[in-house]
Image: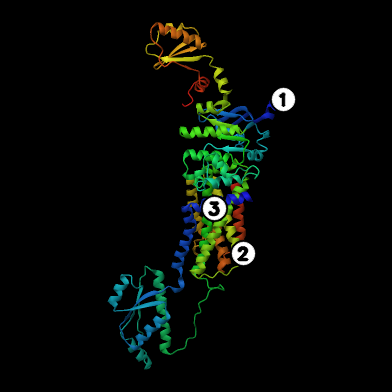
Amino acid sequence: MSLLGRARDDAVIAVDDVRKAYGDVRAVDGVSFQVAKGEIFGLLGPNGAGKTTTMEMIEGLHAPDSGEIHVLGMDVRKFATQIKSRVGVQLQTAALYPQLTVAELLALFGTFYAPSRRQPVERLLDDLELGEKRDAQTKNLSGGQRQRLSVALALVNDPEVVFLDEPTTGLDPAARQGLWSVVRRLKGEGRTILMTTHYMEEAEALCDRLAIMDHGRILDSGTVDDLIGRRFRERGVHFGRAGAPDEEKLRALPGVSRVAYEEDEVVLYTSDVPSTIGALLGLTGRARTEPADLMIRRASLEDVFLELTGRALRD
Amino acid sequence: MRMLAALSVANLKSFTRDRAALFWTLAFPVVFVILFGTIFSGGDARYGLAWVDQDGSQTSTALRSAFAANAPVELTDGTLEESKARMLSGDVDGIVVIPRGLQAVIDAAQAGQHPDPVEVTVITDPSRSNTALAIQQIATGLVMASNLRLSGASPLLTVLSDSLQTNQLNSVSFFVPSILAMALMQLGVFASIPLVQQREKLILKRLNATPLPRWVLVGSNVAVRLVIAAVQTALILGIGVVLLHVEVVGNPIAIAGFVILGALAFTSIGYVIASFARTEEAANGITSVVQFPLMFLSGIFFPLEILPSWLKSIATFMPLTYLGDALRQTMVGGTPFVPLWVDFAVLAGWLVVTLGISARFFRWQ
């Protein structure tokens, strides 16, 4: 109790054993985690894992069936309005008045907050590169522009905490890179960010820490290095299968625990990469060949997810 | 207040930029008023009559002048054959035939004899019963009057046509308040559409993630409806007064009060629809279905007295019956169906009950 209490004091977001069921479906089934100030925390998991429901309970949009949620030290149930005035929310589906222009919509949302918190519309337009579209009705925006506007709307009150729900889903790679740099800038400005994603690359690129969710539960959480290192000590040495030495010789190399053949690649799993590679090059050198496309790869979040759930993330 | 104003302006902008919504809300009632006004401008309805004079005498010419001067008719002379052809092709509404021998009978009567009366034939189209009846009455009236004059008797009884109202309530004056009531009803029940739209597009959810209080959200929706109601009222009344010469006699505050109360009551019915419709399509469907009984089972287009009694008892529960009654009374001094305070109480009752239902069942997301 005391441990929990102390942690809650400096955690910007504290979620404690939260549950939410819709009929028979346990959408969120006992989720706990904390997010520290200035951190980017990610909820990673497939569609239907309970990420969005968890996030929307923290935003005060749904009441949890049980459990406690504190944001900025305040109980979400009791201080929803105070919390809402200090956080910014981007919903998964950009919800915009189709007939209003970008500038009108930003100004409208500005009126919902105290003048002292209100960000100038022009600055938001600049920050999210929407200046050219300021007088366009929102129904005429492209997917990337809508998503940037949606993020801009989350920033009108200069929020201390920003919630981003699948901010880059459906965007092309260039638009995605653009949004990533916006998220990094928000972190640079000292804001705390809670985001959901089902993209591994996005989680690896942005999140300081993340929680992997499936079926309403958190399966594991930590930094990317923690999550991978906890399960995968070994690394994979990959090279072309054509002209590779015999399997027995490969298995006898120092450090190698296992030899796997994947399509046209051979993978040596090893706990000692330098010794394994040295010996491999000695072996191929004597045969006057060299391993084609030699590559060392550590396990990825994809492997972690596969290990945790027994299936690939994008099933 | 700042939030309410900003959100209301945003909603109004959304509304005015949606051309289809704008057309249906503003142009439709206007078209309706003009259409009904043209059809029911009862005062100057004129009938085309073919005049077949087979006598060609001084008396028949005098009778023709009496018709032309004293009845709302246009006379076209011709033989019986020509006139029948004109009636069949729709050029005239009826035929009046003055038979040969009229002058002879008059002469005989003035000479103190008692000849058989001459038969003036009136040919009408029974399938157009209203027109046929009107022409028969006009002809009968004029023939009777001519009888009296020709026989030299002085009239003992005359009919003075008048109605109960201080101001003559013609059909147009009856319909303009009805159309206003109907427009307010539609404006109100269709309030469900933007609300369901905003819920479906997750705009309500997004607003709920801001500190915006819910009463502001509802308040701005209502405010927008009232602004549109004011514009509609001005348009319909303006057309009524300027083009159709309807005399508005009531107290402007009472009229405004009932316009507002009516708009609120029907908007609240719209919110009940929005509480039970999950999608915009469903809301559209329910609203269209609901508005027909609301419209036709109320006494706004025809007097309740002509309805069968079971329909009449349904109509006595319909809010539009009371809004129409109140507007007719306050605007043009129409005959009360019930006293004004009953109209007020029934509309207020609908407002309170439907607000309660919406408050209980409305879902924000």
For the residue marked with disc 2, what is the amino acid?
Answer: Ile
Q: x and y percent of residue A248 in the render?
A: 42, 6
Tell me whether marks 2 and 1 sit on the same chain.
no
Tell me whether marks 1 and 3 sit on the same chain.
no
Disc 1 on helix, strand or loop? Answer: helix
Between the C-alphas of marks 1 and 3, the distance is 53 Å
Q: Quadrant of residue A65?
A: top right
Q: Nearer the viewer, mark 2 or mark 3?
A: 3
Identify the residue position indicated by label 1 in the image. A2
For residue A292, the mark is none
The residue lying furthest to the right in this view is A2
Q: How crowded is the residue under tag 2: few (<14 C-alpha within 10 Å), some, or many (20+)? A: few
Between the C-alphas of marks 2 and 3, the distance is 25 Å
For the residue marked with disc 1, what is the amino acid?
Answer: Ser
Q: Nearer the viewer, mark 1 or mark 3?
A: 3
The residue lying furthest to the left in this view is B81
For residue B253, the mark is 2
For the residue marked with disc 3, what is the amino acid?
Answer: Leu
Q: Is residue B242 above or below residue B345?
A: below
Identify the residue position indicated by label 3 in the image. B12
Between the C-alphas of marks 2 and 1, the distance is 66 Å
